[in-house]
Image (cartoon, rainbow, N blue to C red):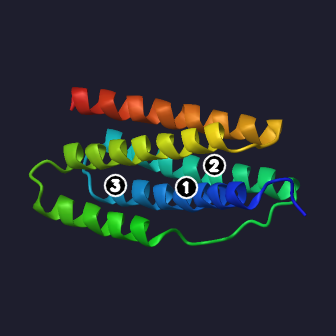
Amino acid sequence: MGIFNESTENKLNDLLEKAYDAEKGFEKACENVDSTRLKSFFKSKAEERRGFRSELRNSLVANGMQVEEKDGSVAGRLHRVWMDTKALFSTDNEESMLEEVRNGEKAALEDYDDVLESCTVDSSTKQVLQKQRSAIQASCNKADYLEDIL
């Protein structure tokens, strides 16, 4: 048996699922822009989220947690469809994709804050979560910066 209670396990599995959604969302954003700078940014963020999933999964499994392997959420799939639709009708795909990324990053920050504030996790898992949260905050800041210079 793992060291986490059921509520914590559910929230941690949700973080894994949302990391998958974010990875696919960044890949979708990459498809919807022409700017090589943005393509590079979105591609690196997709790779980062793939790494987040692996790192978090390894930490959880090491603590005896049963990890649910899912291919994202319904909400994530719907959001990616929305990104395609928005890109189709937008006159400025770069700005609209950065806006969607920023919205997703802000939601991810809230998810990480919820887990860090309301769940009891071991110190190694907490360090993983804090490191990933910091990277998401940096990504959000970079999206703001990129929008300002475009």
Residue under label 2, please give it: 52
Residue 109 got which mark?
Answer: none
Q: Is residue 101 left or right of residue 70?
A: left
Cα gap from disc 3 to disc 2, whole angstroms: 19 Å
Cα gap from disc 3 to disc 1, whole angstroms: 15 Å
> What SS does tag 3 mark?
helix
Q: Is residue 16 left or right of residue 40?
A: right
Nearer to the camera, 88 or 136: 136
Q: Residue at x 55, y 55 (%)?
A: 19
The N terminus, quarter of image: bottom right
The C terminus, quarter of image: top left
Q: Is residue 133 left or right of residue 124?
A: left
Please determine whether, in this image, residue 141 is positioned above or below residue 93. above
**Mark earlier in primary sequence (2, 1):** 1
Evaluate if marks 2 and 1 touch, with contact meaning CB atoms under 8 Å apart: yes
Location of residue 125 in the rendering, given as x and y in whole percent from the top left corner: 76, 42
Identify the image quadrant of residue 5. bottom right
> What SS does tag 2 mark?
helix
Location of residue 89 in the rendering, given as x and y in whole percent from the top left corner: 11, 61
Evaluate if marks 3 and 2 touch, with contact meaning CB atoms under 8 Å apart: no
Pointer 1 local density, CA inside 10 Å: few below 14, some 14–19, many at least 20: many
Q: Residue at x 48, y 30 (%)?
A: 138
> What SS does tag 1 mark?
helix
Q: Is residue 112 left or right of residue 77?
A: right
Q: Residue at x 73, y 61 (%)?
A: 6
Q: Amino acid at mark 2?
A: Phe
Task: Tell which tag, 3 or 1, sits nearer the viewer.
Answer: 1
Q: Amino acid at mark 1?
A: Ala
Residue under label 1, please give it: 19
Q: Amino acid at mark 3?
A: Ala
**Mark earlier in primary sequence (3, 1):** 1
Evaluate if marks 3 and 1 touch, with contact meaning CB atoms under 8 Å apart: no
